[in-house]
Each structure stands twice: as structure tokens, then as C-alpha cells.
Amino acid sequence: MTDIQLYLASGSPRRRELLAQLGVRFAVIRADIDETPLPDETVEAYVLRLAREKALAGWRAAGEPALPVLGADTTVAHDGRILGKPADAADAAAMLRDLSGSTHAVLTAVAVCAGGEVEVTLSASSVRFMPLGEAQIAAYVASGEPLDKAGAYGIQGWGGLFVSDLSGSFTGVMGLPVHETALLLARYGLGHLAEA
Ligand SMILES: Cc1cn([C@H]2C[C@H](O)[C@@H](COP(=O)(O)OP(=O)(O)OP(=O)(O)O)O2)c(=O)[nH]c1=O
């Protein structure tokens, strides 16, 4: 009855929360990979590669199980530059200054590894930030919210107040695009979209 159907290779609490919406019973495993971009790698190639590597590393770490393993990666890109998670508070403030008053892209790739074969899907969103003052940036960084998040903000929290426009997927920006993920899981006969 409580048998799991899938492994989630992720340390992200957001991914856990969003995956719970999809109607699939899962267990969480760790998959640590090197997130350094390759020389001249495009943002799209980077995020797709990382999601694939997380799913594959998770599958291997779990002992190559029969059940599928899901991994994902979220990356913020501005003017062709990749903004990962900030190294510290000063780095977070610099990222927020960079995003202030302009539009950036948020890419989330989701990969499923089954039997060593990986399938991947991509969600791309465009996010516009209002102009931010130094005091606003300092207060937000001091809250701690930016520190474990790509691009140094969380759209689901305080950071959402800075977003004046969004096109794409809100859940994709948060870390797991529920529509694209549901379609991908349905290919494995998993989740609410597979039941219909
Ligand atoms: C832009 C944005 C990112 N994020 C989070 C989602 C991801 O957890 C994180 C991006 O880092 P990732 O490297 O994609 O993921 P992670 O290291 O947190 O987890 P995993 O173990 O799966 O590799 O930023 C938000 O929560 N809200 C946002 O608005």
C-alpha cells in the first residue's frame, strides 16, 4: 500500500513539496555532483547536463534500483551569465543588484533515470524584477532566504514581492515545474496524469 514508486535524488525541500503534488509515492535520496560549468557551455546545455547527472548519480548511489530516479536542476541566467547559488551574503547582494530592474531567465531541467537510460524535459521562464534599493537588498539578504537559492531569491517567499512579471512556470522557477514533470512521469505510468 505504501510502496514507493520513484526516488527523488534531491536535497531541496522545494522539490519534495512540489513532487508531493503529482500523485506519486517517493523516497528521497542524495545525489551530489560537481556543478562547475564546462568551458563555453550554454546555460541550456548546462542545466540539462546537471539534471541528467543528478538522476544518474542518484540511480547509481541507490544501487541501480528497478524504480526510476528523478533529478532536477534550476539555473538563473542573466545576459548569458549563469547565476548559481550565492557563495555568501556579499555574493547574494551582488546577484540581486544584477537582477534589479531587469528581466532574467530561469531554466529548470528535470531528468528521470530508469534502468540507466535518462529522459529529460526543460522548463524555461522569464522573470522581471522591480528596481531594488540598497536597503531593500540588505534587508532581504539578512533574512537568509537568498542563500541556498539559484539567483539569490525565492519566488515562493519574500523574493516573490520583487517579481513584477513572470512568463513561464511559477513551479519551474521554484525548482520543479509540475506540468512538465507530470508529463514526463506519465511516460513511466506514474502520477495523476498517467491515471486519466
Ligand atoms: C530562482 C529560485 C530558486 N530556488 C531554489 C530551487 C533549488 O532548490 C535551488 C537551485 O539549486 P539546484 O542546484 O537546482 O538544487 P539544490 O542544490 O537546491 O537541490 P538538489 O539536491 O536537487 O541539487 O534554488 C527557489 O527555491 N526559488 C526560486 O525562486
Image (tube, rainbow, N blue to C red):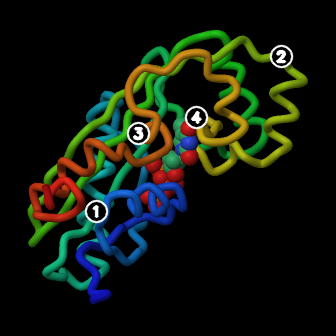
CA distance for labels 1 and 4:
23 Å
Which three-letter amino acid code belongs to the residue tagged 4? Answer: Gly
The location of residue 33, given as percent across then percent down, is: 39, 61
Which three-letter amino acid code belongs to the residue tagged 3? Answer: Gly
In-image side of 144 versus 42 (left or right): right
Q: Residue at x 9, y 72 (%)?
A: 115
Mark number for residue 172?
3
Which quadrant, please, contains the C terminus? Answer: bottom left
Q: Residues within 10 Å of mark 4 (few under 14, many from 20)?
A: many
CA distance for labels 1 and 3:
15 Å
Helix, strand, or loop for circle 2? loop
Disc 1 or disc 4, which is closer to the eye? 1
Helix, strand, or loop for circle 4? helix
The residue at label 4 has a CB less than 8 Å from ligand 1: yes
Query: Looking at the image, is mark 4 or mark 3 earlier in the sequence?
Result: 4
**Can residue 80 be seen in the rendering of this structure?**
yes
Mark number for residue 133?
2
CA distance for labels 4 and 2:
17 Å
Q: Residue at x 46, y 34 (%)?
A: 170
